[in-house]
Image: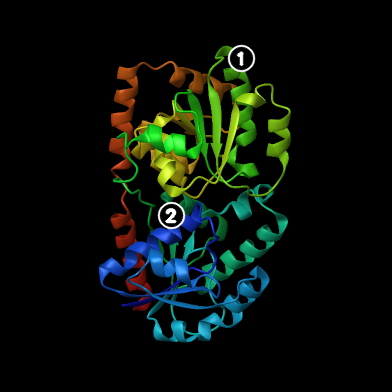
């Protein structure tokens, strides 16, 4: 089958949905299909490195407004689209012209359910894009059963939905020490400080305000523990304000964007990984932390509960006191208790694989191409 995968929206430093697209691009060619990656004009080189088995074309303008207009009005008639059996829009959107059947991935519906978590311009754009895909795509891919359920509630009638949970690289994300002290030294991090880790984009829905509130309580009780926050800036400046005024600001370490090879090191060395997000489509950092055998605390009533099962500790969304209590308990675990929790975490992570995810994607492509 000939599949055109639109990779034009992936930023220079992929996170979340961008990492999902990278994994698809890397792995799809191994299935024997003919894969064409459709990239921005200034972005072909990295895709040829990441996915050497794919054909890369780069017709898409780099500037975001032009890119979105080009996708809507031109890409559907492009040679890449005309030559494909299926077009895959992996980030909510699809061309509005042309006749190639489209598969569109829906990551979450928070643009509808919780618009306050996003920039107003993005709410306006993605609501329209998702509604259009729900009317015109041949098949929708949902990254979780949770998102598929919300999709039914929000949009009602829509094309067939294939649920394709994300996977995790169980070789890269594991609990084995791989000269981690040296990796930490090269990164400029202290090697033997107990810390709570957070990995994710810095934006309102991630619950960083709740995490900072919980850490204020922890820091009063434990004079050594630090909070390490890894991730690139999203939008909003509330986080900066909260950190600046935090009573334990000197023990909050802002790591910024962490290179891929360092993320497993950060997760497996953490005393506990906190992911108090208010809502996600999947919550990939939780799965990656579990694969590293980490102790994980995350949000009840969200997709992270679906991903983590009984391998994570769940606290109510927005409850800083409950989060502080759960983190404090995790920090007091002995070595044997941590090892037992780590085994449960790893077994849970082993239920997810990119091979299984790609099999579901190929199912969606086959359905669309009929």
Return the x and y of residue 61 as percentages of the image width and height: 60, 76
Image: 144 above or below 320: below
Image position of 178 (left or right of 313): left
**Residue 321 in view (yes/no):** yes
Quadrant into which the C terminus falls = bottom left
What residue sits 62% from the left and 29% below the top? 212
Scheme by which the image is coloured: rainbow
Q: Which residue is mark 1?
A: 220
Badge 2 or badge 1: first in the primary sequence: 2
Image position of 23 (left or right of 239): left
Mark 1 residue element:
helix
Quadrant into which the N terminus falls = bottom left
Cα distance between the residues tagged 2 and 1? 39 Å
Which residue is at the front of the view, 26 or 101? 26
Q: Which residue is mark 2?
A: 143
What residue sits 54% from the left and 46% below the top? 257
Return the x and y of residue 327 as percentages of the image width and height: 50, 23
Image: 26 above or below 273: below
* Image disc number at residue 61: none
Q: Residues within 10 Å of mark 1 (few under 14, many from 20)?
A: few
Image quarter of residue 216: top right
Image quarter of residue 267: top left
The residue sitting at the top extreme is: 221
Which residue is at the front of the view, 241 or 113? 241
Mark 2 residue element:
loop
Image quarter of residue 3: bottom left
Please identify, in this view, whether the residue under mark 2 or under mark 1 is nearer the observer. 1
Return the x and y of residue 149 as percentages of the image width and height: 47, 52
What residue sits 41% from the left and 38% below the top? 183
Q: Residues within 10 Å of mark 2 (few under 14, many from 20)?
A: many
Image: 50 above or below 306: below
């Amino acid at each position: 089958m000939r599949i055109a995968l639109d990779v034009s929206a992936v930023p220079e430093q992929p996170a979340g949905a961008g990492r999902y697209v990278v994994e698809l691009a890397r792995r799809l060619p191994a299935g024997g299909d003919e894969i064409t990656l459709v990239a921005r004009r200034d972005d072909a080189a990295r895709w040829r490195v990441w996915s050497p088995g794919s054909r890369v074309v780069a017709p898409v303008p780099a500037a975001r407004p032009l890119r979105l207009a080009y996708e809507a009005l031109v890409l559907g008639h492009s040679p890449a689209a005309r030559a494909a059996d299926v077009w895959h829009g992996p980030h909510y959107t699809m061309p509005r012209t042309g006749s190639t059947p489209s598969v569109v991935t829906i990551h979450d519906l928070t643009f509808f359910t919780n618009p306050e978590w996003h920039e107003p311009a993005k709410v306006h754009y993605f609501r329209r894009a998702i509604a259009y895909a729900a009317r015109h795509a041949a098949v929708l891919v949902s990254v979780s059963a949770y998102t598929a359920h919300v999709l039914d509630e929000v949009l009602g009638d829509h094309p067939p939905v294939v649920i394709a949970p994300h996977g995790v690289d169980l070789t890269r994300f594991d609990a084995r020490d791989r000269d981690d002290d040296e990796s930490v030294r090269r990164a400029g991090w202290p090697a033997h400080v107990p810390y709570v880790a957070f990995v994710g984009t810095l934006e309102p829905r991630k619950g960083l305000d709740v995490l900072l509130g919980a850490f204020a309580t922890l820091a009063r009780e434990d004079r050594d523990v630090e909070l390490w926050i890894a991730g690139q800036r999203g939008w909003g400046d509330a986080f900066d304000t909260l950190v600046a005024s935090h009573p334990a600001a000197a023990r909050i370490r802002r790591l910024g964007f962490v290179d891929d090879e360092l993320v497993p090191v950060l997760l497996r060395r953490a005393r506990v990984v906190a992911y108090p997000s208010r809502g996600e489509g999947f919550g990939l950092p939780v799965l990656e932390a579990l694969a590293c055998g980490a102790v994980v605390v995350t949000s009840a009533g969200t997709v992270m509960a679906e991903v983590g099962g009984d391998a994570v500790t769940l606290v109510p969304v927005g409850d800083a006191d409950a989060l502080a209590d759960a983190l404090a308990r995790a920090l007091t675990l002995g070595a044997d208790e941590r090892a037992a929790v780590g085994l449960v975490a790893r077994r849970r992570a082993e239920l997810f694989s990119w091979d299984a995810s790609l099999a579901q994607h190929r199912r969606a492509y086959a359905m669309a191409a009929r």
